[in-house]
Amino acid sequence: MFVFVGDGEEYCEVAVCGGSCGGLCGEVGVAASQRLAESVRGMCGGSCGGVGRYFVSRYTPLMPRPNPCPNPCNVLLIGGGGREHALAWKMKQSPRLGKLWLTDPANAGFAQLGTPCPTRWDPKDSFRLQRWCDQQNIHLVVVGPEVPLAEGAADALTSETRHVFGPTQAAAQIESDKAFAKQLMRQAAIPTAETRVFDHVDAARHYLETHEEPCVIKAVGLAAGKGVIVCNTQAEALDAMERIMLQREFGDAGSQLLVEEKLTGQELSVLALVDGRQIWILDPAQDHKQAGEGDTGPNTGGMGAYCPTPLMDRSTLEVIEREVFVPAVDALRREGIEYRGVLYAGLMLTPGGPKVLEFNCRFGDPECQPLMARLKGDLVEILWATATGTLTNVELDFDNRIACCVVMCSEGYPGSYEKGKPITGIEKAQAMSDGGGEVIVFHAGTTLNQEGELVTNGGRVLGVTALAKDLPSARDLANAACEKIHFDGAFYRHDIGDRVLVNS
């Protein structure tokens, strides 16, 4: 699904009136003009005196901006987890790919996909990587994880001859600073949970001691997806506050605290490619954060995901497009921030409609794995178009099959765990097929030891991803493939997708 957001002379816009007429006056207001581009909203100009707010779900490009993807295109991929393996795997299929360089080549899944980069991203020494990119004629830098984006990797590595897929440091605040994101949502009238932000322990404790209702406690900064604690009692909320602000379980991410109302409903992930003015919404997915079967246990970086989800029909997706993505990109533009990269909205489908739980500034992990498994088209060209503001120049489509990713983890995760456990059976897993099914094993926390053996090297070890005709078949195939893979202490959830399968 495509959306246009912008004010440039090269595209047409539509502005609708937000006055008492409910948009029925048919006036196209000055909000769509170049003069009020920075404010995005302006007086409609009609008799009702309403405020125009522009959005479209269909638009006409008047003058395409030529900026073709180089052929061949040399790419640097920053990051070394399961998400990055999925991106590298898909980019390797591109006929446009020149040389693929990897900043984190320890991941054993990268062995046949690219060349190790001798210089890693370091925000304190970014010039070293800039110079290396110049020397190697890197055309496109793809930043996978959120931390380098929050540190300014896109700002540092962009040049006249090199583009970066991933938002600037200012734009990445939408994930790296949850207080900033909440303020942005309030300003843009994006539906979200009611929230209080606290800088001091005493104020947070006093608030929680006077409120007994269930809530969600969040560390404001980056916490690898683990800084969210759902609390059903006052005692749990106070304990979560102490873990985050006093014990600093998530480090500096706990310098501020968010207390949110606890929303109810189905949770899902909607990701979109944003090239500054155009939004291409990808097929929605559903992630599973908690470590245990039946959504029990502590939060993790993600135990599995499937795509697409039947929870989202077209009308609901259009509501999310209109009320979430377009206002978010508009609000960033009002702050002088042009967003380019992936914008991830974590949503709750509440009885009152979709509400935003969080925004992320990158592909989700593990949502990226089923998305890449289903993606049709040239990923290098798609990423280039996103980075250069030319999304209208590319085609994007998905396999009709359902993809289900089951994450195999080390014993002890998300707490402490041992590394170096030998892994066997991946070849047997990937050889499985069942009625048009297919298995792809993405590496997350793996490496090769000194003897050349494949061993564990992280908490989330493998993303076993299966494609099949429907969700039950894809989930069963992924679970069967997991049974073929062995390492000491391995565990995984068998119930990915149960939230919709049981309810249906």
Image (cartoon, helix red, strand yellow):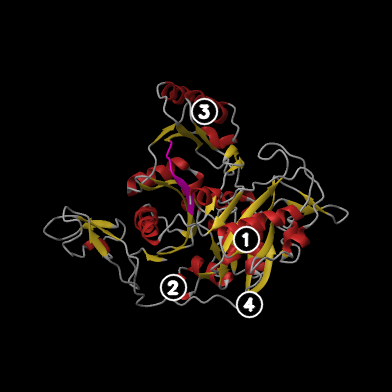
* Amino acid type at image mark 2: Thr
* Amino acid type at image mark 3: Met
Q: Which numbered disc flags the more N-terminal residue, 1 or 4? A: 4
Q: Secondary structure at mark 4?
A: loop
Disc 1 to disc 4, how far (Cα)? 26 Å
Does residue 106 appear left or right of residue 77 in this picture? right
* Amino acid type at image mark 1: Gln
- Residue denoted by label 2: 392
Q: Which numbered disc flags the more N-terminal residue, 2 or 1? A: 1
Q: Observer-nearest residue: 215 or 147?
A: 215
Magenta segment boundaries in residue numbering: 262-269
Q: Which numbered disc flags the more N-terminal residue, 4 or 2? A: 4
Whether residue 186 is in magenta: the answer is no
- Residue 209 x %, y %: 44, 21
Q: Secondary structure at mark 3?
A: helix
Q: Secondary structure at mark 1?
A: helix
Q: Which mark is residue 95?
A: 4
- Residue denoted by label 1: 130
- Residue 99 x %, y %: 68, 71
